[in-house]
Image: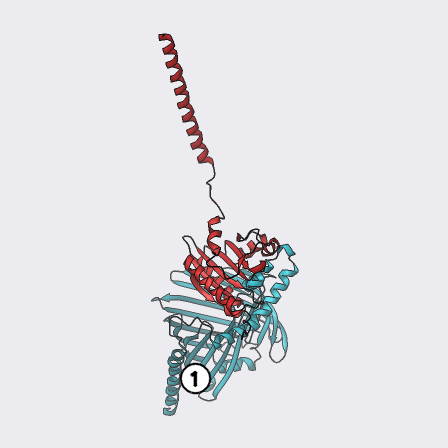
Chain colours: A red, B cyan
């Protein structure tokens, strides 16, 4: 009987020791592996895209995110909204002093009538240079700046200069942009929205 | 002499009255200028477009000619935002127009219009630019002191002329530069001109020394060279002191044309500055003799945005042809900048 107990005790102790050893080994492996593994960071965080999207409350009446792949391809993005990754567009952003840019297209029936373009800058001088360029374009654009911990986002809303927007549509656009500005707490840089074609006389 | 003093006093009163009233009336003293575009802004934009759009067109033509479709920026972004790259490429393309009105004791009023234009061609080469200037600086040894008599003298000797052509910056660094320009001088006929110019900056203690050397050839005046040595320093945060010595020799100069001017200026704000300039110039052939002493007190004020400036410059010349008599004058200059002049 004593022998049986002793054998059981030995077995239990042995299993416990083995368990402890495995635990220590796995802990060590986990620690070692964790140290060697590259930090799990997102270079293009999805939260940014979510922030840049207009909520249903901000979207102009009848507008939605455009999903037509041909239009998205023309804009150089794969989803909507998305980071701009096409080489020529990335090069253009870099030449203009930006580090990264995002794009969102809105409109009724897959016809883009409003574009949100965000360009991220780490250097204030380059940001201001970009603002100056945007101004000289004299395009129907409203531009805002959003200061972050490490840099600045230049967020601009553009409407198509060649399309006609009705008075009601323009009002809805301005209202949506205003709500968007309040949500993201952005400062307005300039408003050139009036430069597009004037609305038709509805009287 | 009494009437002369009365004349001078009147000019001075008019000048400073303009300096005080004109900017106040236009709201230039306000720290923040209106952000809403006014009628004047729109007209300025329109005139700037005449300069920038052709420049953008040239750059775009060269960019698109050598770029495959897949390497071009998204057409949709261009449709909404315009061609942003062209706008970046023409930064530093501008024209400065400077009407100068000189009220002079002997000749009443003299009017000149200077201009200087630069067109950047970054798509062809970042260091290449087209230039067009109403004045040729190579023969002018008192560049910082405007004097209508001296200008007329240069014009009579066919040494002053407008020039247009291409500049290639062989080296362009903060402390040194070397450029080669070739083009045409135009006034009383057209003649080709080539010029090589180098500058070297050397800071020591609070001073900055600069040596500039130009060598040039044009068919009308032949070979020539110009050497400049200048020293500058800042003091008391708003003050700047400068000294420039220049000497030019050319096949049409009277021996060596030499000049020296000192300037001391106070920059009260980015909008206002006041300076005192004194200068002397002469030549060495047939004998070394000073031709002119000059004194100027320019007051410069930004009038509107960052493209319209006024400079009121009372002063006096002491010319050899007038037996070094005190000859008062007043220069009133407007500087109008059109185009994209943020950086060059």
The residue at which mark 1 appears reads as B329
- Residue at position x 42%, y 80% in the image: B313
The quadrant holding residue A23 is: top left
Query: Considering only vertical position in the picture, is A49 above or below B2?
Result: above
Q: Position of residue A10 (x, y in %)?
A: 38, 14
Q: Is residue B158 visible?
A: yes
Q: Position of residue A22 (x, y in %)?
A: 43, 24
The quadrant holding residue A90 is: bottom right
Q: Residue furthest front?
A: A203
Looking at the image, residue A119 sits to the left or right of residue B1; the answer is right
Q: For the residue labelled by badge 1, is the local secondary structure a helix, a strand or a loop? A: strand
- Residue at position x 44%, y 77% in the image: B310
Q: Position of residue A121 (x, y in %)?
A: 47, 56
The chain holding disc 1 is B
Quadrant location of the N terminus of chain A in the rendered image: top left
Q: Nearer the viewer, residue A89 or A186?
A: A186
- Residue at position x 43%, y 61% in the image: A179
Q: Nearer the viewer, residue B29 or B197?
A: B29
Q: Position of residue B318 (x, y in %)?
A: 43, 83
Q: Residue furthest left?
A: B236
Q: Is residue B144 visible?
A: no
The quadrant holding residue A202 is: bottom right
Crowding near the residue tagged with mark 1, few <14, some 14–19, many ≥20 C-alpha atoms within 10 Å:
many
Query: Considering only vertical position in the picture, is B67 above or below B268?
Result: above
């Amino acid at each position: 009987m004593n022998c049986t107990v002793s054998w059981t005790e030995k077995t239990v102790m042995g299993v416990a020791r083995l368990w402890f050893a495995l635990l220590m080994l796995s802990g060590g492996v986990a620690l070692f592996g964790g140290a060697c593994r590259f930090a799990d960071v997102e270079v293009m965080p999805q939260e940014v895209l979510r922030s840049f999207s207009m909520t249903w409350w901000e979207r102009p009446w009848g507008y939605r995110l455009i999903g037509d792949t041909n239009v998205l391809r023309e804009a150089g993005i794969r989803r909507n909204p998305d980071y701009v990754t096409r080489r020529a567009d990335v090069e253009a952003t870099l030449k203009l002093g930006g580090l990264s840019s995002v794009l969102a297209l809105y409109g009724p029936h897959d016809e883009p009538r409003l574009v949100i373009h965000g360009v991220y800058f780490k250097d204030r001088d380059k940001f201001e240079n970009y603002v100056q360029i945007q101004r000289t374009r004299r395009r129907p654009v409203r531009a805002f700046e959003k200061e972050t911990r490490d840099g600045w986002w230049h967020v601009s809303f553009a409407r198509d200069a060649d399309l006609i927007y009705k008075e009601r549509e323009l009002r809805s656009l301005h209202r949506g942009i205003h709500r968007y500005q309040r949500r993201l707490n952005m400062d307005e840089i300039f408003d050139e929205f009036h430069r597009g074609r004037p609305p038709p006389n509805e009287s | 002499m009494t009437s002369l003093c009365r004349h001078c006093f009147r000019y001075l009163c008019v000048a400073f009255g303009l300096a005080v009233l004109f900017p106040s009336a236009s709201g230039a003293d306000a720290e923040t200028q209106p952000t809403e575009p006014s009628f004047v802004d729109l007209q300025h934009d329109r005139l700037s477009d005449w300069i920038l759009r052709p420049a953008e067109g040239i750059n775009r033509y060269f960019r698109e000619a050598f770029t495959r479709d897949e390497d071009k920026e998204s057409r949709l972004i261009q449709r909404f935002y315009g061609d942003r790259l062209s706008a970046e490429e023409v930064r530093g393309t501008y024209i400065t127009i400077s009407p100068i009105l000189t009220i002079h004791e002997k000749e009443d009023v003299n009017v000149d219009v200077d201009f200087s234009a630069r067109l950047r061609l970054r798509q062809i080469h970042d260091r290449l630019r087209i230039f067009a200037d109403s004045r040729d600086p190579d023969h002018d040894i008192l560049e910082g002191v405007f004097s209508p008599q001296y200008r007329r003298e240069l014009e009579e000797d066919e040494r002053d002329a407008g020039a247009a052509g291409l500049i290639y910056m062989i080296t362009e660094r903060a402390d040194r530069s070397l450029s080669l320009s070739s083009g045409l001088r135009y006034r009383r006929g057209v003649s080709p001109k080539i010029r090589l110019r180098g500058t070297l900056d050397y800071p020591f203690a609070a001073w900055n020394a600069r040596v500039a050397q130009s060598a040039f050839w044009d068919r009308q005046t032949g070979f020539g060279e110009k050497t400049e040595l200048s020293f500058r320093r800042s003091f008391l945060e708003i003050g700047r002191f400068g000294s420039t010595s220049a000497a030019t020799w050319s096949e049409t100069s009277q021996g060596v044309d030499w000049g020296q001017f000192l300037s001391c200026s106070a920059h009260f704000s980015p909008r206002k500055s006041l300076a005192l300039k004194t200068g002397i110039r002469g030549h060495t052939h047939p004998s070394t003799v000073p031709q002119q002493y000059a004194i100027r007190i320019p007051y410069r004020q930004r009038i509107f945005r960052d493209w319209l400036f006024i400079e009121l410059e009372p002063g006096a010349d002491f010319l050899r042809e007038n037996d070094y008599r005190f000859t008062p004058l007043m220069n009133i200059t407007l500087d109008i900048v059109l185009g994209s002049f943020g950086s060059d």
